[in-house]
Amino acid sequence: MRQVEVALGERSYPILIESGLISRAGAQLHPYARGGRLVVLSDENVWRHHGSTMSEALAQDGIEAVRILVPAGEGSKSWAVLGDLLEKLLALGLSRSDPILAFGGGMIGDLGGLAAALLKRGCGLVQVPTTLLAQVDSSVGGKTAVNMAGGKNLVGAFHQPGLVLIDPDVLGTLPDRELRAGYAEVVKYGLIADADFFCWCEMNGFALLEGDAAARLHAIETSVRAKATIVAEDEREAAGGRRALLNFGHSFAHALEAEAGYSGSLLHGEAVAAGMALAMRLSVAEGLCPDEDAMRVAGHLRVMGLPTSIPGQDPQRLLARMRQDKKNASGRISLILSRGIGQAFQTDAVSEERLLSFLQHEVSGGRSVA
Ligand SMILES: NC(=O)c1ccc[n+]([C@@H]2O[C@H](COP(=O)([O-])OP(=O)(O)OC[C@H]3O[C@@H](n4cnc5c(N)ncnc54)[C@H](O)[C@@H]3O)[C@@H](O)[C@H]2O)c1
């Protein structure tokens, strides 16, 4: 079993990664199941594919799975679903020492994580991520949130899990488009601070998508190790801290997702892929980054079936969305840009005029997907 530690003093926790881990989850989860039961939050898709494996694994260790299901999709990451979930948890008589087990993708992890942060001012949380995106990113680091009409993830809390269990085998049932979208977040770690890992992605990305177990394991472990290191340095995304780098591509992505209405027409990882390609091109336009690096990144994303632009946007509306970004301070838009592959940094030096002109050039009208 691979193990990565998120070193946060008394809130430190392990990330365990192993093929088939869910079918043996009872042994890992036994210490958390006080009173012989465990609340498992999941969505209907995940439960249909993997619910019986989870229930049986818990039952083997004498734990009853009390399941709560929400509809699949980003629409469930809402204030209304959160309120309903909290009422259900209270009706179950959950105490602060009873953890919520978030069994699903990033939607379930963010929703369940926020419920755990709020319930009785904070109860335990175990993350069992089932999408590539959640396995390499969202299940680690303690960010939880729901979306509001004004934008994505605008209401949330930092609430670290006590344990993360990653079973790469569950990716076998993940739709191809979701797998590709999650792969964008894998590439992100290479682009932020690990040029060698980006090279590895160029060499092994196809194998990963096609189901190569060793490639998946390597990508997951490298990604969570990178994330754990950054989170340990800067847990709460302090001003000027390293955690903001994990938002590479996300200023554009969140604006694009909001414009798409959080619909299935644009998945989070797809928006991140387009956002990263745009951040690279803006870095080139600002004279910060070699053109060949931006072209190499766009080329890789494109061959992996990911978008590198989302044309047909209203640049003024996108800019207005980008003004809502949580990284912004003192009325300036803060962006993560790049000096080259593996060299991301945060800056507020791009004026709104230059950003608007860039958006007009890159994403307005009918510019075809690069
Ligand atoms: N908290 C963080 O640090 C963080 C980081 C990145 C992204 N996020 C959030 O994560 C969310 C996106 O997560 P996601 O891409 O995992 O989406 P998701 O949770 O909506 O899952 C995508 C789809 O795959 C299905 N699914 C999940 N696991 C499956 C499996 N093993 N087999 C078959 N189907 C399966 C789901 O039912 C859903 O239809 C966004 O809301 C994003 O904001 C959070």
Image (cartoon, helix red, strand yellow):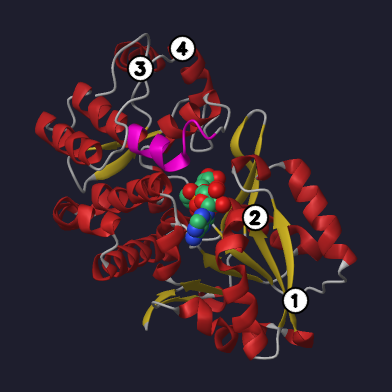
Report the residue that reaches farthest toward the top: 365
The quadrant of the picture occupied by the N terminus is bottom left
Q: How many C-alpha atoms fall within 10 Å of the one at disc 1: few (<14), some, or many (≥20)?
A: some
- Horizontal side of 11 relative to 356 (left or right) equals right
**SS at mark 2 in the image:** helix
Q: Earlier in the sequence, mark 2 or mark 4?
A: 2
Residue 44 numbered mark, or none = 2
Q: Position of residue 216 (x, y in %)?
A: 30, 65
> Quarter of the image holding residue 338?
top left
**SS at mark 3 in the image:** loop
Q: Residue under circle 4?
A: 314
- Horizontal side of 173 relative to 101 (left or right) equals left
User: Looking at the picture, which amino acid does disc 4 mark?
Assistant: Asp
Residue 80 shows up from this direction: yes
Q: Earlier in the sequence, mark 1 or mark 4?
A: 1
User: Looking at the picture, which amino acid does disc 1 mark?
Assistant: Asp
Query: Which residues make up the magenta segment?
Result: 264-274
Residue 98 numbered mark, or none = 1
**SS at mark 4 in the image:** loop
Q: Position of residue 240 (x, y in %)?
A: 41, 45
Q: Are the residues at dot 3 and dot 1 in contact (C-beta closer than 8 Å)? A: no
Kindly identify the residue that appears in the image at 86 percent across and 56 percent down. Answer: 87
Q: Residue under circle 3?
A: 363
The response on whether ligand 1 sits within 8 Å of label 2 is: yes
In this view, the mark in front (3 or 2): 2
In reply to whether residue 193 is colored magenta, the answer given is: no
Q: Are the residues at dot 1 and dot 4 in contact (C-beta closer than 8 Å)? A: no
Q: Is residue 98 above or below residue 348?
A: below
